[in-house]
């Protein structure tokens, strides 16, 4: 109707409200918004918007259809407009203050729930900080995707003003300690940890850990052992899959970080 872009319209309304020409709803209304990004797919965001009305002379407050419209004041400013502390600011400040630890997204939401932060706010706000290199986000890794753990994605602060490689390595190590030290009755997680233990033992003994050996150590079905081994390879970047013979169905996994020189004996069967 006005011919203005939505951004220009928002700025005009903000100025009119600040100059006392219109009244604005005291609380923002939030609605989901799906953005089409072409070949990159789509993303879903939660956007706030306000209701506006011309301000009658001498009127500072107006109720309309369940909404309260108020005159401009410092206390009525919207935190998302840069005033006060937004949810994103609260989440980032929490991670910066506790930069020596890693937290699951559900833990962050629980810690900040008294400040109005919900579970859906955490990752929605942290994605852009991840792209800026301020936080490290970890999940199960597949060939072309990443999925959250049971408790959500694991997140930690990346130290700024220091060597970038060292800061990122330290962040990865914090997430690894958190995953290794957490107590879980989840059978799949226990198998994944057991797979790593078996591989670590074999590496220390300068030997190879075949899939058959891992399967026998887990004491589960072959399919369950395959799933646990695949998950372990996704979860721990220092594990590597090696096939000694082309076409063999037996998986050999070693700790690539150790860089040991393996010399299997002629009688080694795989």
Image (cartoon, rainbow, N blue to C red):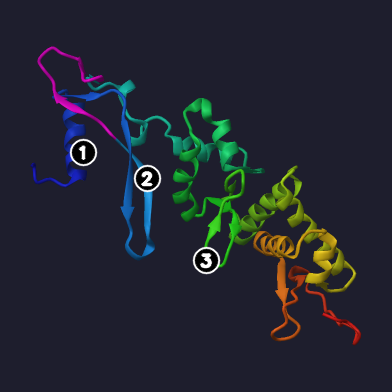
Vertical position of residue 105 compared to residue 260: above or below:
above
Dot placed on the residue nearer the N-terminal end, 3 or 2: 2
Q: Which mark is residue 10?
A: 1
| Spot occupied by residue 224 in the image (x, y as percentages of width and height) | 72, 60
Instruction: Look at mark 3 in the image and give the residue it sits on.
Output: 144
| Spot occupied by residue 147 in the image (x, y as percentages of width and height) | 55, 55
Helix, strand or loop status at disc 2: strand
In three-dimensional space, the C-alpha distance between marks 3 and 1, rounded to whole angstroms, equals 39 Å
Vertical position of residue 101 compared to residue 238: above or below:
above
Q: Which quarter of the picture shows residue 85?
A: top left
Q: Residues within 10 Å of mark 2 (few under 14, many from 20)?
A: some
In three-dimensional space, the C-alpha distance between marks 1 and 2, rounded to whole angstroms, equals 18 Å
Q: Is residue 67 magenta?
A: yes
Q: Residues within 10 Å of mark 1 (few under 14, many from 20)?
A: some
| Spot occupied by residue 238 in the image (x, y as percentages of width and height) | 71, 65
Dot placed on the residue nearer the N-terminal end, 3 or 1: 1
Q: Which quarter of the picture shows residue 30?
A: top left
Quadrant where the N terminus is found in the figure = top left
Q: Which quarter of the picture shows residue 217?
A: bottom right
Q: Which residues are magenta?
A: 49-68
Of marks 1 and 2, the one in the foreground: 2
Which residue is nearer to you in this view: 217 or 199? 217
Helix, strand or loop status at disc 1: helix
């Amino acid at each position: 109707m006005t011919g203005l872009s939505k951004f220009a319209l928002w700025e005009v309304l903000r100025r009119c409200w600040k100059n006392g020409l219109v009244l604005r709803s005291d609380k923002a209304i939030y609605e989901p918004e799906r953005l089409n990004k072409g070949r990159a797919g789509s993303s879903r965001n939660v956007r706030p918007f306000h209701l506006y009305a011309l301000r009658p002379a001498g009127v500072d407050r107006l109720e309309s259809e369940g909404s309260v419209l108020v005159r401009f004041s410092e206390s009525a400013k919207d935190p998302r407009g840069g005033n006060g502390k937004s949810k994103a600011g609260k989440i980032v400040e929490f991670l910066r203050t506790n930069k020596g630890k890693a937290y699951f997204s559900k833990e962050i939401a629980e810690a900040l729930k008294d400040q109005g932060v919900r579970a859906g706010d955490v990752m929605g706000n942290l994605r852009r900080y991840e792209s800026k290199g301020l936080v490290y986000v970890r999940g199960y890794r597949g060939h072309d995707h990443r999925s959250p753990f049971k408790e959500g994605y694991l997140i930690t602060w990346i130290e700024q003003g220091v060597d970038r490689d060292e800061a990122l390595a330290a962040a990865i190590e914090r997430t690894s300690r958190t995953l290794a030290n957490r107590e879980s009755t989840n059978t799949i997680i226990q198998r994944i940890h057991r797979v790593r233990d078996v591989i670590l033992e074999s590496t220390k003994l300068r030997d190879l850990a075949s899939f058959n050996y891992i399967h026998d150590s887990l004491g589960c079905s072959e399919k369950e052992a395959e799933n646990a081994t695949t998950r372990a390879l996704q979860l721990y970047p220092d594990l590597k899959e090696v096939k000694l013979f082309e076409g063999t169905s037996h998986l050999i996994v070693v700790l690539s970080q150790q860089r040991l020189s393996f010399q299997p004996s002629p009688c080694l069967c795989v």
